Amino acid sequence: MTPSPAALAARPHAPASAPVRSRAGAVIPAMQVLTLTEALPGFPAHRDYALVPADGAGVLSWLQSVAPDGPRFLVARATAYFPEYAPELPWAACAELGLGESADAQVHCLVTVPDGDVAAATVNLRAPLVVSPLTARARQVVLADPSHPVRCPLRR
Amino acid sequence: MLTLTRSVGETIRIGDDIEIHVVEVRGGTVRLGFKAPREIAIHREEVYRQIAEANLLAAQVTADTLGALAAFAPPAVGADTAAGTAELASEDAQG
């Protein structure tokens, strides 16, 4: 289990602001507290989450509800797995998140592992989680382009 | 369920600030236009349901899969580990 965001924040020797470094040397932001401008479909009661790095390489993160017994999702940094993935974000979504430049957006995709079989793991490229680091706002954006699959195999 | 009959060019209003316009009817297909406050999400039902189902499955992922999943990522190229970027769409499309 991943420690809860509250536990992470309270741990004196691991301040939430402490950055970690990826294998390529880039700084991976530590835990980000996010407010969803629209709840995730299927989870209408939850809008407050923390994005917590889940691996040393900076490609996977937990999207953890801050509510007790709230949901937790594993998200993959989209371009780490799919370098060619460059979804067109609706202008309205960018405005809502306070994204002046879409290049400022962090794009993550929710990971599904059917029956715990990692070889069958998929990511949702049709509805990425778009994060604005500046405003700490995020939402799952359902793309108009149907060529992005909801279940895209993660293993290639 | 309330059912109403409308013709092309006519509108249905829901509450104070949601409008649904009948734009075109051809064969068995109707094209609708929506005006709604930004916080109202508008989705095709089948797409919304697909996303919700995928999210429900995604909420069941456990930490013991992390190592294998991280290994699926291709090796990082240079120092390009910044978060994924996206292009700004010029049109204000909603699925």
Image: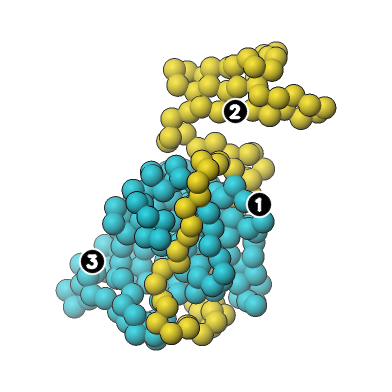
Chain colours: A cyan, B yellow
Instruction: Write the residue at 47% across / 34% down.
Output: B40
| Disc 2: host chain | B
The residue where tag 3 is placed is: A9
Q: Amino acid at mark 3?
A: Ala
Residue B87 on image: x %, y %: 48, 57
Residue B63 visible: no
| Disc 3: host chain | A
Mark 1 and mark 3 in contact (Cβ < 8 Å)?
no
Count of numbered badges drawn on the protein: 3
The residue where tag 2 is placed is: B33
Q: Quadrant of residue B39?
A: top left
The residue where tag 1 is placed is: A146
Residue A131 on image: x %, y %: 39, 57
Instruction: Write the residue at 63% across / 58% down.
Output: A148
Per the image, label 2 sits on a secondary structure element best described as strand
| Circle 2 residues within 10 Å: few <14, some 14–19, many ≥20 | few
